Image (spheres, rainbow, N blue to C red):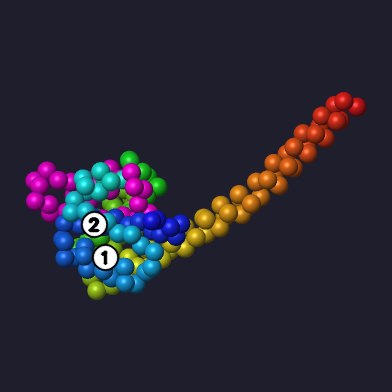
Amino acid sequence: METASEVLIFIVDDDAFFSKALEGYLLNEITGLRIQIFPNGEACLHEMHQNPDLILLDYKLNSEFPYAWDGLQVLKKISQVDPGTPVVILSGGDNLEIAMDCINTGAIEYVIKNEQAFEKVKKVILDIKDEMVDDAAVEKVSSKNTPQIIGLVILIIFIIILLFKL
């Protein structure tokens, strides 16, 4: 059962070993995660109705399907389907032009697959979890104040009615 603080993460990478290693690391390091792995972008897009909190998307998807989309094409589709879903691009290459294309297309981060990649992804997830907690706190305060606000509005309307009757 999904809890309020649970974070749903999609990992989209055709390298099954990398995906499982990243999943294992994240589940070991961070509590409250639910992770789904997809070997291609099309499968990920098919499941967007689950409203993931974060998508970790490989830039170079070398799928066995000759017409499968690469990471940038998938990022564009995600941005069309749900522009609010944060996407982190994972790439084996250190290319500034590609990184800028990804950021300009909507990625929140471009992480190079090196020895620091898992730590960088962990930091992004922790930041997202913090934002979710902050948003939940604001929502809780707002819902607590709703009866008071409604009462105040009714009082103001009552005063206006009284003034017009005088």
- Quick check: marks 1 and 2 in contact, CB under 8 Å? yes
Around disc 1, counting alpha carbons within 10 Å, would you say few (fewer than 14), some (14 to 19), or many (20 or more)? Answer: many
Q: Residue at x 85, y 26 (%)?
A: 164
Give the residue furthest to the bottom: 115
Report x, y in % for residue 19.
21, 63
Q: Amino acid at mark 1?
A: Glu
> Which residue occupies the foreground of this view, 98 or 84?
84
Which mark, residue 37? Answer: 2
Secondary structure, mark 1, is helix
Q: Which residue is mark 1?
A: 23
* N-terminal-most mark, 1 or 2: 1
Report x, y in % for residue 139.
56, 52
Whether residue 82 is in magenta: the answer is no
Can I make out residue 156 in this image?
yes
Q: Which residues are magenta?
A: 49-78
Dividing the picture into quadrants, the one containing residue 28 is: bottom left
